[in-house]
Amino acid sequence: MMNSRDRVLTALERKIPDRVPTFEVAIDSQVIDAILPGADLLDFVDTMELDAVAVRPNVDRTKIEEDVFQDERGVIVRRTTQDYLEPVNTVIKNEKHLRRFEFPDPHASHRLENLKKAIARFKGRVPVIAFLRDGWSEARDLHGFAESLSDLIDNPGLVRGIIEKAVDYYSELGRLAAELGAEIAFSGDDIAGNNGLFMSPRHFSNIIHPAMKRLYKNWHDCGLHIIKHSDGNLEPILDLLVDTGLDCLHPIDPLAGMSLEKVKKEYGDRICIMGNVNCAGNLVFGTKDQVVQEVKKCINVAAPGGGYILSSSNSIPRSVKPENYIAMIEAAKQYGKY
């Protein structure tokens, strides 16, 4: 019988493990506490026997007011109703600001402290994922979402410059994470929504795709496997995404009309697929039995031949019923055996 590390790495290499792996890249703290009162993420992964754990770099933040902070990039962020910090200002408005801007020191002593703790606890039995970015989200945060979309057309050099600096930063973070013992990099940049891509396929191809490809090569050179995340309908650029060198695509968003069956059929021989139990559907509004049926359907569609990881269609937000998430984990283990 495989352990979680063997199981996940086998799936990422598009081979057949002993059973379908299951884990989440983000689980809301209130859901964790409802299931295991007082537990942190590492305790939860251990107790629930999830197959991987994703850990973000540590970022220092200075409190400005209640639920409002300034992070090391100079970005002011506000805590939302989820475990999420939403940017409320921009720090790069023009080329002059871009030339002056530097990302926080990736070598700072605190930067990978949480990653070190996870590796010390799980190394050799549960793969530790470095939760990083691939550039577009930094343009969104530092220059503004609407501004970055407009400047893909009006000032592409500025957007490209931000993304290239981000690639350099996350390349180094990935290298440091791999040296510590992380085995997977998770790239969490949304490039689409329910209505389609945020930008045209041409702008993705010309500006974002080359940067992702460079970053992923750097990560692969460090020995990291790569899971790429984006919500939304990615069909117009699936070939380009596969061309970046990613090992796994997450989460095949059902709310945006993505078909797990179609992606498995057309790309399952080239990439691992991760998803896609609807985290805004049965996990929130359904019964435990409905969740189990959805899990079984995902497994039946995507597990044959290997190369499949079962997860939610994004993450486990606060709105998910704890008992439904437990049902999802248990069903994955029961019905995901090869």
Image (cartoon, grey):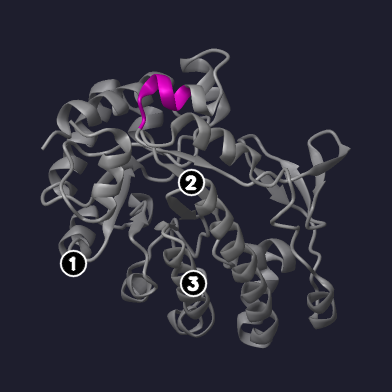
Describe the element under mark 3 as helix, strand or loop.
helix
Identify the residue under disc 1.
Answer: 266
Depth check, mark 1 against mark 3: the one in front is 3
| Quadrant showing the C terminus | top left
Quarter occupied by residue 49: top left
Residue drawn at (58%, 67%) of the image: 136
Magenta part of the chain: 44-50
> Where's residue 47, x and y in %?
41, 19
For the residue marked with disc 3, what is the amino acid?
Met
| Quadrant showing the N terminus | top left
Q: Are marks 2 and 1 in contact (CB under 8 Å)?
A: no
Work out whether residue 321 can be spotted.
Answer: no
Q: Is residue 231 left or right of residue 275?
A: right
- Can residue 7 be found in the magenta stretch? no
User: Mark 1 vs mark 3: which is more N-terminal?
Assistant: 3
Q: Are marks 1 and 3 in contact (CB under 8 Å)?
A: no
Identify the residue under disc 2.
Answer: 181
Depth check, mark 2 against mark 3: the one in front is 2
Label of residue 182 in the image? none
What whole-number distance in Å separates the C-alpha atoms at marks 2 and 3? 23 Å
Residue at the far right: name it.
64
24 up-or-down from 288: above or below = below
Residue drawn at (22%, 39%) of the image: 20
Determine the main secondary structure of the stretch shown in magenta. helix
Work out whether residue 140 can be spotted.
Answer: yes
For the residue marked with disc 2, what is the amino acid?
Gly
> Where's residue 94, x and y in %?
80, 79
Label of residue 212 in the image? 3
What whole-number distance in Å separates the C-alpha atoms at marks 2 and 1? 33 Å
52 up-or-down from 75: above or below = above
